[in-house]
């Protein structure tokens, strides 16, 4: 059998071209281009583009941006926390956080990654833990006035804001008052 000229021919990918990884970003971030800085970035992160500081330049912004996106793309199924970025990049933590928040807001990082709340969800069939709050000392614990005393500590039920010796012999400290502090 002979092949017809109408058959579809596939072009082999040259060995020197790397394979491309595909990442999902939201449609509202379609302005993003890896090789250049978009006007949206220049407007919303203007401190990097106004020339006010040598530590805030377009080149530094692009390095921050590219590092954060690359770090997220190492494992896109996992949420990238800011603390992980902070440990890896040197610079003003406020500016780093601003770039991180910008990228996260526009869905260039952590888009579709599970949130931290997902781990707290209870699996089906698993009962929730019941919490019981009790007041007072736990069973078997005895609160005493002095470390070597066996006499239990008893405080008056109605305070009234006084200091002095109560019937059990325990001296209560006076209540703090700011009225006499500023003379």
Image (cartoon, rainbow, N blue to C red):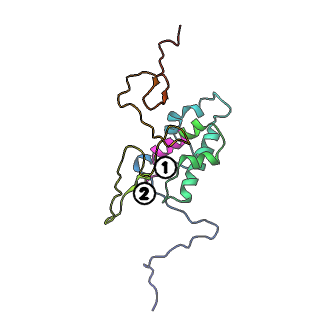
* Left or right: 109 as drawn, with respect to 126: right
**Does residue 164 appear in this view?**
yes
Which numbered dot is residue 41? none
Q: Is residue 32 above or below residue 54?
A: below
State the image coordinates of residue 93 (x, y, percent, origin top left): 60, 38
State the image coordinates of residue 22 (x, y, percent, origin top left): 49, 61
Of the pair 147 and 107, the residue shown nearer to us: 147
Residue lying at 45% horizontally and 43% vertically, measured from the top left:
105
Quadrant containing the N terminus is: bottom left
Of the pair 18 and 171, the residue shown nearer to us: 171
Classify mark 2: helix, strand or loop.
Answer: helix
Part of the protein shown in magenta: 98-114
State the image coordinates of residue 159 (x, y, percent, origin top left): 38, 26
Of the pair 119 and 102, the residue shown nearer to us: 119
The residue identified by callout 1 is 108
* Left or right: 113 as drawn, with respect to 146: left
Q: Residues within 10 Å of mark 2 (few under 14, many from 20)?
A: few
Q: CA distance from mark 1 to mark 2?
A: 23 Å
């Amino acid at each position: 059998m002979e092949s017809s000229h109408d058959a579809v021919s596939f072009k082999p990918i040259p060995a020197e071209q790397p394979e491309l990884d595909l990442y999902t970003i939201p449609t509202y971030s379609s302005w993003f281009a890896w090789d250049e800085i978009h006007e949206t970035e220049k407007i919303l992160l203007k401190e990097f583009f106004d020339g006010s500081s040598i530590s805030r330049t377009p080149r530094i912004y692009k390095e921050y941006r590219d590092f954060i996106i690359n770090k997220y793309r190492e494992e896109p199924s996992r949420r990238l926390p800011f603390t992980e970025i902070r440990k890896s990049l040197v610079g003003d933590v406020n500016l780093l956080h601003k770039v991180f928040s910008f990228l996260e807001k526009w869905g260039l990082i952590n888009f579709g990654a599970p949130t931290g709340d997902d781990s707290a969800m209870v699996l089906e069939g698993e009962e929730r833990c019941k919490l019981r709050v009790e007041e007072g000392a736990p069973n078997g614990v005895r609160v005493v006035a002095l470390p070597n005393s066996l006499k239990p500590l008893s405080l008056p039920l109605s305070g009234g804001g006084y200091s002095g010796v109560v019937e059990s012999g325990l001296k209560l400290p006076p209540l703090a008052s700011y009225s006499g502090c500023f003379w």
